[in-house]
Amino acid sequence: MALNQLDPSFADLLPRSDSRFNPAQRALEEGRLDEAERAKLALETKQRARNRAREERGERWTPRFFAAQEDGEGYVYKGGYWEARRDVRLAAASRPSCETIPD
């Protein structure tokens, strides 16, 4: 078992954004560097497009479980993560995975 190997017995308990679900991470760990680079570029391209579309709609992204510090130098945990995780189905459905970011 590798450090980041995904144990199927608790895969449903992890947030869908966990790095073990990231195809670029998996390819890198398995030595498939060209594939890892392509996967990383594809993910970043989708993220940029999603951010651009959000900005065009005039929406502002805000973290769900963190709030910006008043001095603007970081974030503080505002609670609620573990409560949200109690309902695994809700928690999994509410987060995009590395593979489900829309084109």
Image (tube, helix red, strand yellow):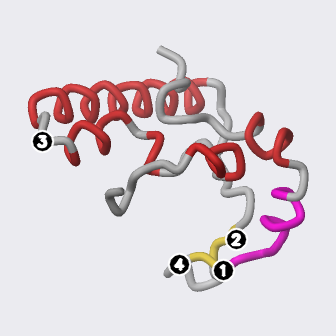
Q: CA distance from mark 1 to mark 3?
A: 36 Å
Q: Nearer the viewer, mark 2 or mark 3?
A: 3
Give SS at disc 1.
strand
Q: Which residue is mark 2?
A: 67
Give SS at disc 4.
loop
2 and 1 marks in contact (CB < 8 Å)? yes
Give SS at disc 3.
loop
Judge from the rendering whether residue 84 lies leftward or rightward of residue 64; answer left or right: right
Q: Residue at x 60, y 76 (%)?
A: 75
Farthest residue to the front: give it: 1
Q: Position of residue 28 (x, y in %)?
A: 20, 43
Q: CA distance from mark 4 to mark 1?
A: 7 Å
Q: Earlier in the sequence, mark 4 or mark 2?
A: 2
Q: Amino acid at mark 1?
A: Val
Q: Which residue is mark 4?
A: 74
Q: Which residue is mark 1?
A: 76
Q: Amino acid at mark 3?
A: Gly
Q: Position of residue 48 (x, y in %)?
A: 40, 32
Q: Amino acid at mark 4?
A: Gly
2 and 3 marks in contact (CB < 8 Å)? no
Q: Nearer the viewer, mark 3 or mark 4?
A: 3
Q: Nearer the viewer, residue 57 or 64?
A: 64
Give SS at disc 2.
strand
Mark number, residue 31: 3
Report the magenta residues as a range: 77-85
Q: Is residue 81 magenta?
A: yes
Q: Residue at x 63, y 80 (%)?
A: 69
Q: Is residue 39 magenta?
A: no
**Mark 3 crowd level (few <14, some 14–19, many ≥20, 10 Å Cα):** few
Q: Earlier in the sequence, mark 2 or mark 3?
A: 3
